[in-house]
Image (tube, rainbow, N blue to C red):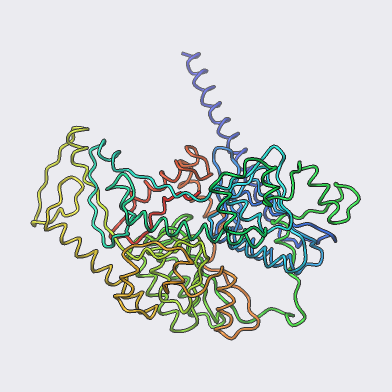
């Protein structure tokens, strides 16, 4: 018996000690993270410094100062993102800083949407006007990384690397056959022949309407890419298409001969080239500054910019699927966005509002709640919308009331349509699993929308009527906001997705440009010469956000890791379907363009 108690006590004490060790390791890592990110001391630059842009983290519209953001519970390391706002601000700042002699683009990886890449590309094009150099380097160029690299003065690749240039391909996931195997029957009610968000559940390939819209917008995106490359590298668009169609970029020699790159260099040879660019004696004398450190360098002010500007322009970041309630890392909550819009509307120092949208849409109800607040904001001050990678369906719904809508050429927008999606799992439960159901109703249609029975024609007609009503409200809002007739909106609606360039042609967008262009228009409409930016919503406290990461993302991290891939996209889509409530106004954002 004594032996038993000794063993039990030893096991108990061992478990406690192991727990203490884990906790100590955890808090040591936490303290390290905080200490490495908490320093807000301004950074002084040496002369002849090179700004190194290594864009190897996921790029989102708005960066976070939270040291716990994206914490990976497997590696016990943070997986931070890069904010597009930070990247654009610092490229602009680098052009004015006399200590910055040029930019080194390290592009061996790039995790960003194509419209985001376009905004960075355009910011670098503006930087080049300062007369400073841009050197791009990668071990291997994907089409996306090469598009960004093409703006550089000189482009180099690892001799053992290469590049891809074959045109764009859009791939969609279809679940119809898988659902049939499991005995699940989708019940789909929609308006709009192009409302392809539901096609993965009812078809095993694209409909002709979906194929038409997809071909149109990927052609538009490709044309933007090759037009920009053509200007930067002095290669005609006809030649670029010929190179892609004929697979002429067989190796690095061909890439150099065709004008895509300036040469092949190992990284140490590239460092020697950069040494000469800044007149350093040795490679070790090159002064690099990272984006993170350069962000702490004060911006050089002009003579007429002394003191703090009194007037403000609010930038409200609205990213993710549109849902009711509070926003999360991946969703745009109507309550959070409405609160931010109201705060900007009621702040007398805020003279104009820029609503930055990056969303595939979502709940029609939540979209309408946000739309109403945009109308109230527009009545008091200029409201400008800036569209990121996506501003489609519900994302366009919340944009349509703005004074001016600004989109990148490669933004995916439109998708003006709505749908309802239910799943009938009767066969799965009855025949596959062996579970049956019985019911008691107080009224004839008390169980309308139940997943455990077939839907009657009367029930379908009732839900279809609700979808039609919401679609009617949607296109009326667009018609009022864009100065069109309802018939005109319906003709370009029907759930069809457009690129930003296409949307400009049909009147859904006013100006092609990025976030900086939207801010410029807001300042002009408000009559502002000097102003400062007020970002909204206010970011959460680090520990609060850390707890959300702990409870919400740990399971996904352990299965898929933090990097996005086809499996993590399917997981996210499953979560989206599970949380879907009511009629949806959303884009089929599971499209993979590469």
Can residue 94 be seen in this snapshot?
Answer: yes
Say whether residue 330 is left or right of residue 311: left
Identified at 72% across, 48% down, the residue is 156
Say whether residue 292 is left or right of residue 322: right
Q: Quadrant of residue 502?
A: bottom left
Q: Residue furthest bottom?
A: 527
Q: Vertically, is 481 above or below 292?
A: below
Q: Nearer the viewer, residue 254 or 83?
A: 254
Q: Nearer the viewer, residue 238 or 103?
A: 238
Where is residue 102 shown, x and y percent of the image? 77, 60
Identified at 53% across, 44% down, the residue is 562
Identified at 67% across, 63% down, the residue is 124
Q: Nearer the viewer, residue 485 or 538?
A: 485
Where is residue 109 shown, x and y percent of the image? 62, 46
Say whether residue 374 is left or right of residue 268: left
Q: Vertically, is 245 above or below 558?
A: below
Q: Vertically, is 140 above or below 441?
A: above
Where is residue 105 shown, x and y percent of the image? 70, 53
Where is residue 237 shown, x and y percent of the image? 58, 59
Identified at 89% across, 47% down, the residue is 282
């Amino acid at each position: 018996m004594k032996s038993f108690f000794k063993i039990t006590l030893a096991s108990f004490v061992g478990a406690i000690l192991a727990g203490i060790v884990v906790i100590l390791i955890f808090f040591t890592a936490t303290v390290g993270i905080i200490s490495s990110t908490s320093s807000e001391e301004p950074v002084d630059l040496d002369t002849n410094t090179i700004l190194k842009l290594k864009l190897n983290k996921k790029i989102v519209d708005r960066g976070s100062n939270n040291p716990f953001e994206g914490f990976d519970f497997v590696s016990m390391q943070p997986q931070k993102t890069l904010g597009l706002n930070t990247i654009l601000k610092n490229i602009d700042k680098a052009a004015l800083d006399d200590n910055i002699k040029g930019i080194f683009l390290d592009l061996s990886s790039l995790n960003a949407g194509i419209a985001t890449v376009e905004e960075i590309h355009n910011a670098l094009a503006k930087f080049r006007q300062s007369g400073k150099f841009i050197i791009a380097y990668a071990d291997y160029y994907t089409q996306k990384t090469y598009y960004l690299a093409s703006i550089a003065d000189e482009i180099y690749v690892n001799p053992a690397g290469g590049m891809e240039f074959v045109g764009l391909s859009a791939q969609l996931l279809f679940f119809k056959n898988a659902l049939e195997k499991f005995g699940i029957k989708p019940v789909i009610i929609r308006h709009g022949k192009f409302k392809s968000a539901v096609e993965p559940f009812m078809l095993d390939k694209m409909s002709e309407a979906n194929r038409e819209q997809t071909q149109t917008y990927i052609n538009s995106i490709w044309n933007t890419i090759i037009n920009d490359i053509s200007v930067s590298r002095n290669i005609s668009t006809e030649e670029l298409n010929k190179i892609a169609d004929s697979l002429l970029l067989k190796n690095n020699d061909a890439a150099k001969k065709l004008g895509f790159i300036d040469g092949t260099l190992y990284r140490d040879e590239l460092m020697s080239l950069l040494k000469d660019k800044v007149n350093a004696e040795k490679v070790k004398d090159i002064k690099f500054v990272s984006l993170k450190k350069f962000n702490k360098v004060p911006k050089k002010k002009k003579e007429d910019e002394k003191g703090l500007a009194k007037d403000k322009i609010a930038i409200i970041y609205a990213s993710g699927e549109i849902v009711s309630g509070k926003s999360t890392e991946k969703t745009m909550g109507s309550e959070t966005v409405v609160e931010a819009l109201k705060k900007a509307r009621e702040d007398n120092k805020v003279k104009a509002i820029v609503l930055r949208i990056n969303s595939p849409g979502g709940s029609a109800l939540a979209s309408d709640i946000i739309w109403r607040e945009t109308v109230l904001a527009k009545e008091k001050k200029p409201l400008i919308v800036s569209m990121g990678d996506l501003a489609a369906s519900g994302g366009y719904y919340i944009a349509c009331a703005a004074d001016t809508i600004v989109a990148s050429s490669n933004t995916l927008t439109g998708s003006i349509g709505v749908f309802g999606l239910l799943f009938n799992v009767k066969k799965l439960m009855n025949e596959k699993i062996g579970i049956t159901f019985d019911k008691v109703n107080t009224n004839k249609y008390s169980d309308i929308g139940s997943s455990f029975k077939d839907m009657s024609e009367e029930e379908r007609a009732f839900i279809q009527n609700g979808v039609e009503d919401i679609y009617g409200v949607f296109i009326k809002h667009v018609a009022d906001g864009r100065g069109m007739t309802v018939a005109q909106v319906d003709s370009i609606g029907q759930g069809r997705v457009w690129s930003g360039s296409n949307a400009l042609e049909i009147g859904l967008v006013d100006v092609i440009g990025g976030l900086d262009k939207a801010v410029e228009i807001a300042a002009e409409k408000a009559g502002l010469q000097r102003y400062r930016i007020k970002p909204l919503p206010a970011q959460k406290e680090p520990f609060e956000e850390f707890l959300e990461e702990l409870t919400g993302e740990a399971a996904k991290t352990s299965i898929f890791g933090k990097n996005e891939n086809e499996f993590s996209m399917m997981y996210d889509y499953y979560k989206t379907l599970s949380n879907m409530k009511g009629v949806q106004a959303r884009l089929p954002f599971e499209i993979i363009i590469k």
